[in-house]
Amino acid sequence: MRRNWLAWAWLGLPILYFCLLFAVPLIDLLRMGFSKPLPQRITGGDFSLDNFVEIFTNPLYRDTLWVTIRIGATVALATLLLGYPLALFLARTQSRAKGFLLFLTLSPIFISVVVRAYGWIVLLSNKGLVNSALMQLGLITRPVRLIFNETGIVIATTHVLLPFMVLAIMGSLQSLDIALEDAAASLGARRWQVLRDVVIPLSLPGVAAGVMLVFILGVSSFVTPILLGGQVVLTMPVLALQQFTTAFNWAFGSAITLFLLAAVLGITIAYDRLLQGRLARGAA
Amino acid sequence: MATNLVLEKVSRGFGQLTAVNNIDLHVQPGEFLALLGPSGCGKTTMLRLIAGFLSPDSGRILCDGEDITKLPPYRRKLGVVFQNYALFPHMTVLENVGYGLKVAGVPRVEATSRARAALARVGLTTQDDRFPAQLSGGQQQRVALARALVIEPRLLLLDEPLSALDKSLREEMQVELRQLQQRLGITTIFVTHDQEEALTLSDRVAVMRAGRIEQLGTPREVYDTPVNSFVATFLGTTNLLDGTVAAVADGVASVRIANAEFPFPAASFRPGQAVQVTLRPENVSLASSGSGIAGTISDVLFQGHRLIVLFEAEAGGEWRAFCPPNSGPWHKGEPVWMGWTEGAAAIISKGDDDA
């Protein structure tokens, strides 16, 4: 009995933490989102659908949502294309440098997002390293615009989120029995056939998790879009932040946040449903 | 015609460890050969070298005279059955079995009918559309076997394929495997640490230890006339008796063990040499009077199908005898004489093992 009591006590603290720091703010967000924006009260007034009427009727918000999702999807695809070969290499290498290479892969996580964003600005600006190198090589005559647009956001966010994709894929590759690859080879499958028929299909759960994770982190990030989008490219989190910090309209900011939350949740559930059927075979 | 396989001075190490040490081996066409030994003896490494999953540090591997040492596994055309079957979990039974044909570019219709035929051959016809996780261990084993056989491999390599099955199913599969191998006449190499399985299934057994083949022979040869105490003790239970060669005459060595002398057919022994004799407990004959090694019964254990009689020699040493359950009666503490019929014990010259 005493043990049981203790177990609940242990669980109590996380529950309390979760309620205070997640549930309560979320409820508050819901209340503010569905309230009438008032100039004299930034947390909004009585219940009202005004905010959502504005979001659904003003094309700015629909366009911004589209830009946000496009950036998230592009980043997910880019991290997948870059991350899969890297994860495959890291999961299979016998090299002694494996630990170091893994550390290098994860290193973006250890540096502040702000520092990384400024680093990318230095690299990608009109007089930055990338443009200088391309001009020196004679590939371009005028600098290509790589920051303060979507390209810059995608490049920097890909860098930020690549480790998550690599870790997700590596997880499923490492749990894959090497004997399966040997079996395929003994049956006459060449290396690329083994990859196509065995390794890739069986690592799809990791790929699916990685894509989902990177997409969600991508559409909800705001530091990189603000710094590399230069407030010119608007994404949903940037819009929401503006409402909270410069327009002082928390009610509308909450509505934007809820709208993004609902959109992402919808996409996530649809994606999950779509994959469930296909992955069930591999997971069985 | 079945394939023969030759290993010429094949070695393979892992860092400091020499897993396979300068092995020469000729496997006859159609032969069922078991590689038997304790874990870490190099038997699995040897199988992986033959399959091409590992390459030897030195030596050659020849298949029907063709040097396959440097050939990648996908070009060797060998059927491999893995310890945990290594079935593709995302493919159905039929897709698993048909995979080798698919990558070989066999048209789909033909591949399907050949895969079905292979499944029929292993006695599994109603599970085509199931996934491996939905099958029992024995069924998975059959799928793995069908998958390996469908590509009409030159050799069949089996890596402890029965070890994951429970005892009764294992015995059933042993018989089936042997019958299938005989019917197909395919040269088969079988890795196992189970001595009984090796004896039951194979035409010849290679008993391995520390990367070397200690003895290669028919099950009867390695069981009845082990070359050293390692082989003698690894295959079943045995009594190792210390003795001294008393005299050698006309190809017969007279060996003194405890208080008695026993004749052995032997050529290369000299008087005074210390030898060891291996005597299987089932070959021991006990008598309550007469000649032989004198001693006392220290315990009698009833096992249902037999009695284990523990025997303590007057001259020192405790040995055991397996007797029919209705023999005796033997009683603890009784004096008894131990002997054996000629040819039932084999001599091992001392010091040629524990290397």
Image (cartoon, grey):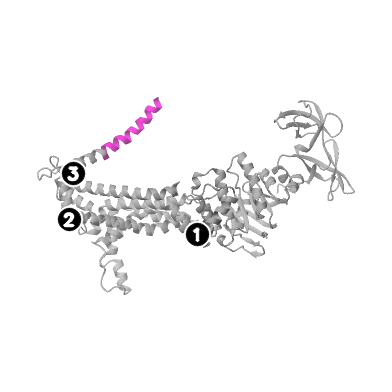
Of A59 and B334, which appears nearest the observer? A59
Tell me the subunit letter for badge 1.
B
The quarter of the picture where residue A226 lies is bottom left
Name the element at disc 2: helix
Location of the N terminus of chain A (image quadrant): top left
Q: Which residue is mark 1?
A: B108
Secondary structure beneath dot 1 equals helix
User: Label 3: which residue?
Assistant: A33
Q: Which residues, given as a range, are shown in magenta?
A: A1-22
Under mark 1, the amino acid is Arg
Q: Position of residue A104 (x, y in %)?
A: 40, 56
The main secondary structure of the magenta stretch is helix
Question: Identity of the amino acid at label 3?
Answer: Gly
Number of callouts in the render?
A: 3
Q: Visible in this render: residue A182?
A: no
Q: Label 3 marks which chain's residue?
A: A
Ranked by sequence position, the earlier of labels 2 and 3 is 3
Q: Position of residue B73 (x, y in %)?
A: 57, 60
Say if A123 sits above or below B85 in the image: below
